[in-house]
Amino acid sequence: MLVAPSILSADFGNLANEVKAICNAECDLVHVDVMDGHFVPNLTIGPVVVSAVAKATTKPMDIHLMVENNTFFVDLFAPLRPKYISFHIEEEKHPHRLVQYIRSLGVKPAIVLNPHTPPESIEYLLADIDMVLLMSVNPGFGGQQFIPSVLERAKRLKALIELHNPNCLIEVDGGVNNQNINALKEAGVDIVVAGSYVFGNRDGYKEAINSLKI
């Protein structure tokens, strides 16, 4: 299991050191949540802050767009050279075009599904993307409770991926901890995003990250 701590739960007054700390704790990706206050009822960070994250990290960035006007935000963040940029299928009118555009910028395209969105809705796109991010909470805020139905959705998605693009990864974001990590692994999940579980762990970042690497 790969682990991508979400900096949404980090101490933003000490952000560079927080990013360095999770990298030293052997995370696999640094997950960056970009929210615009329109697609979700929260506002987070822009390219100026994320450029500081890019300078501090020794791990690839995984940028999750929770925004309207996806192409505008792709143009803002692609120059920072993240490994992945993911966008919500619920917001995008021309997803295949955007997938192709993200890849043309040298970034791996990924698609995000909200808890109510069936995996089958993106079956026609699986051959062209590198990752699917399944939300296991409603997007917009950190620290929410895990929605167990994501496990069944992950299994359905895994079956579709095996059919169309076995190299496509499954990522899950929201409420991930050491209590549900085994079930996520069994459901076929490859990457977990963990924010409050990592940054709020009393035993330290390395211990939290290691507990998810099963």
Image: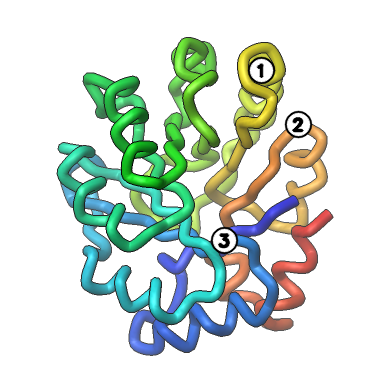
Residue 67 on image: x %, y %: 23, 43
Residue 175 on image: x %, y %: 58, 51
Q: Nearer the viewer, mark 3 or mark 2?
A: 3
Residue that numbered label 3 is attached to: 29
Give 160 or 178, whichever is nearer the viewer: 160
When the figure is inspected, residue 119 is found, relative to residue 53, above or below; the finding is: above
Q: Are marks 1 and 3 in contact (CB under 8 Å)?
A: no
Question: In the drawing, what numbered circle is on residue 97?
Answer: none
Q: Residue at x 28, y 23 (%)?
A: 97
Quarter-of-image position of residue 23: bottom right
Residue that numbered label 2 is attached to: 187
Label 3 – label 2 distance at C-alpha: 21 Å
Q: Are marks 3 and 2 in contact (CB under 8 Å)?
A: no
Q: Decide if residue 69 is on the left or right side of residue 184.
A: left
Label 2 – label 1 distance at C-alpha: 9 Å
Question: In the drawing, what numbered circle is on residue 156?
Answer: 1
Secondary element at image label 2 = loop
Q: Amino acid under label 2?
A: Ala
